[in-house]
Amino acid sequence: MPESPAQLAAESIVDRLRAAGYDAYFAGGCVRDLLLGHDPSDFDVATNARPDTVLAMFQRTFAVGAHFGVILVADTIDGREIVTEVATFRSDESYSDGRRPDSVRFSDSAEEDVIRRDFTINGMLLDPQILRETGNVSAAVIDYVGGRGDLEARLVRAIGEPLKRFEEDKLRMLRAVRFAARFEFEIEPLTEAAIRSFASHIAQVSRERVRDELERMLTEGHARRAFELLDRTGLLREVLPEIERMHGVEQPPEYHPEGDVFIHTMMLLDQLPAGVSPALAWGALLHDVGKPATFQRAPDRIRFNGHVEVGVRIAEDIARRLRFSNDETEQVVSLVENHMRFGDVEKMKASTLKRFFRLPGFPEHLALHRMDCLASHRDLSLYDFAKSRYEAMPEHEVRPVPLVTGRDLIEAGYSPGPRFKELLALAEDAQLEGRVHSKEEALDLIRSHGG
């Protein structure tokens, strides 16, 4: 595998530190990824050089975490700015906030540094000089915690005592799930048991950090596996109880032969590719979130009257709780709010259809509808109809320049007021449906309707 700019930058840092008499290695996820044959997105360096030494040795540095021994070193490789995290070997004291150590003690021991990390597969070091000399990743790995064996066994295992690792940083419970899903590994039984027994403590983690982990799970290409593991470990009930409540909520078998609302939702998540937009991923997860609260066994069949409206309110609550951005909230809520409208797409008037196509990010609405169909009755006829019409319709037909504006109404003798909106909508509908083609025709239509 050719060396990436990130790897070259990290090698340069290691070489300079070693030339100055310090120990330095690649550390963490980049070592794991190299052993798996993946191209790491970034490289971290661990060293016994103290933070002030690192700051003095490199020209462009950022002391973002110097108190914890972490310095960012910037370099330019092949015209790209590369930022490498350089961390001093350390051992951690108590974690009273369940996130960061109250204090750290810098160390000269690489082994002491490794054993305070989270999981064995993330706890290996690598000597880049040996890698250059041999071309053999495995020969260059330094493994104090059995990470290589757990990679081969496809296990996510906490380093040392699992409960202690999770007491130190509760977010590690979500990270265990994410790694197991991403690599299609299992969580080692004692590690999983510790998560189950400690799951309620995830409430101590900031909502932003929880959101970020969940979003990674949804967008890394293994969303169904991640959410099934969240459910199995008890974490789903703690972070998204609205999804856990979908269990056992029956659906009419003629439309949903796949089973209950939870199964249906998992089947949507199964279709999310790596790199999917976060908004579409959240929309897939939340599109039926209103069904548990609206379940009704009517005489004719199971019904969920008002589930869209209830789902919109729940989606807004979740977005607020997890502190989504305004833009992401708007799109996720729109996906929930409009996902049932495809049922009427063949019967929509031209004006209604064009306004439907105007929804921001309409291709995401199409994608959600397709997933929804494939996770239930598998009939794509409405999807095919909407997609073909959307792709065939020129932009100027979907969003034509209005034939009549408010200024035109004023010039025609109308007084501004609440009725303006009605009159403009009347003219726009006729324009979108091809019934009027000029300002004069539109004004005549308005006059004929008593405007």
Image (spheres, rainbow, N blue to C red):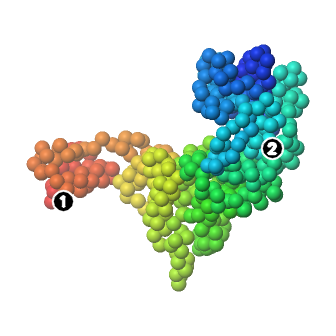
The residue pinned by badge 2 equals 120
Residue found farthest to the bottom? 299
> Residue 2 at x, y = what percent?
77, 24
> Residue 389 at x, y = what percent?
47, 50
- Amino acid type at mark 1: His
Q: How many marks?
A: 2
Q: Residue 292's image quarter?
A: bottom right
- Badge 1: few (under 14), some or many (20 or more) residues near its Cα, within 10 Å? few
The residues tagged by marks 2 and 1 sit, at their Cα atoms, a distance apart of: 74 Å
The residue pinned by badge 1 equals 449
Q: In which quadrant is the C terminus drawn? A: bottom left
- Badge 2: few (under 14), some or many (20 or more) residues near its Cα, within 10 Å? many
Residue shown at the point (81%, 32%) measured from the top left: 109
Q: Residue 35's image quarter?
A: top right
Residue shown at the point (17%, 43%) measured from the top left: 407
Is 55 drawn above or below residue 194 in the view shown?
Answer: above
> Residue 414 at x, y = what percent?
12, 51
Is 401 drawn above or below residue 69 in the view shown?
Answer: below
Is 240 drawn above or below residue 441 in the view shown?
Answer: below
- Do we see residue 430 in this rendering? no
Q: Nearer the viewer, mark 2 or mark 1?
A: 2
User: Is residue 25 left or right of 217 when viewed as pictured?
Assistant: right
Q: Residue 139's image quarter?
A: top right
Element at badge 1?
loop
> Residue 248 at x, y = what percent?
64, 72
| Dot label at residue 130 | none
Q: In which quadrant is the N terminus drawn? A: top right
Element at badge 2?
helix
In this view, the residue in front, 204 or 343, is: 204
User: Is residue 231 left or right of 190 when viewed as pictured?
Assistant: left
- Amino acid type at mark 2: Thr
Decide which of tag 2 and tag 1 comes sooner along the chain.
2
